[in-house]
């Protein structure tokens, strides 16, 4: 299901309207190339166009990214495998996940995964993962769970190491700390 009517999208493409970039993509059947709405290339004839919602959809249909508007080099583009990586990290908060394991999981070059992560989150993969593990820890602590239990549930072998990371992340000691 498309969000807009064909004619509406066609008009946006004719106007090179960049406010719709990322919201839909123009696939050109005659050239097997796909574009963002703002592409400066000559607007194709209506009969040569099909619209899709996502870049992944265009790729699955066999279209190649346009060399002029580079629809894959945009901040809105999230490859399917990147979602898979994030999902995997979020369901494995109980341990450190080596980058190489992620590379094997989605069959992508580790440097590619790191680059996309950096662009989308401004973080290294391990920093993103640690942040989420410690946020989980924070939630468990506020539910009244003991520090020693929480530490091992989010993948720390020692309470000391856990507390150090926790303080570094949130900039404060947790409330159970004895302040003698
Ligand atoms: Zn283009």
Image (tube, rainbow, N blue to C red):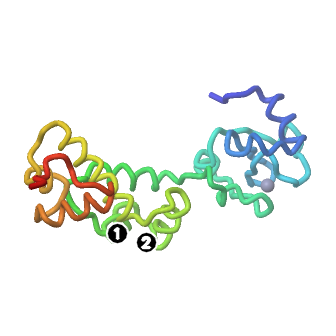
Disc 2 crowd rating (10 Å Cα; few below 14, some 14-19, many 20+) is: some
**Drawn side of residue 150 relative to residue 58, left or right:** left
* Residue 176 place in picture, x, y as percent: 13, 47
Q: Which residue is mark 1?
A: 99
Query: If the picture is divided into quarters, which one holds ligand 1?
Result: bottom right
Nearer to us in this view, 124 or 179:
179
Residue visible at 25% across and 53% down in the picture: 92
**Drawn side of residue 167 relative to residue 150, left or right:** right
Nearer to us in this view, 88 or 119:
119
Residue visible at 75% across and 48% down in the picture: 36
Q: Quadrant of residue 21?
A: top right
Helix or strand or loop: what does disc 1 sit on? helix
Nearer to us in this view, 156 or 46:
156
Q: Which residue is mark 2?
A: 110
* Residue 32 place in picture, x, y as percent: 74, 53
Residue visible at 53% across and 56% down in the picture: 120
Residue visible at 43% across and 66% down in the picture: 124
Q: Earlier in the sequence, mark 2 or mark 1?
A: 1
Q: Quadrant of residue 164?
A: bottom left
* Residue 110 place in picture, x, y as percent: 43, 71
Helix or strand or loop: what does disc 2 sit on? helix
Residue contact between numbered discs 2 and 1, judged by CB atoms under 8 Å: yes
Where is 142 relative to 150, above or below? above
Where is 103 relative to 22, above or below? below
Disc 2 to disc 1, how far (Cα)? 7 Å
- Does label 2 point to a residue whose CB lies under 8 Å from ligand 1? no
* Residue 121 place in picture, x, y as percent: 49, 57
**Quadrant in the picture for the N terminus:** top right
Nearer to us in this view, 116 or 84:
116
């Amino acid at each position: 299901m498309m969000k807009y009517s064909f004619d509406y999208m066609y008009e946006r493409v004719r106007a090179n309207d960049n406010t719709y970039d990322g919201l839909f993509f123009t696939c050109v059947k005659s050239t097997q190339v796909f574009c963002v709405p703002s592409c400066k290339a000559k607007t194709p004839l209506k009969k040569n166009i099909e619209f899709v919602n996502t870049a992944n959809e265009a790729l699955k249909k066999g279209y190649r990214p346009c060399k002029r508007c580079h629809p894959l080099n945009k901040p809105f583009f999230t490859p399917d495998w990147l979602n898979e990586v994030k999902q995997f990290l979020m369901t494995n908060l109980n341990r450190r996940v080596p980058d190489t394991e992620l590379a094997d999981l989605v069959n992508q070059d580790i440097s590619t995964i790191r680059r996309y992560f950096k662009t989308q989150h401004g973080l290294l993969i391990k920093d993103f993962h640690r942040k989420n593990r410690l946020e989980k820890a924070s939630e468990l602590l506020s539910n009244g769970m003991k520090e020693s239990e929480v530490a091992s549930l989010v993948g720390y072998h020692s309470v000391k190491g856990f507390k150090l990371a926790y303080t570094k992340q949130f900039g404060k000691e947790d409330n159970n700390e004895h302040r003698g």
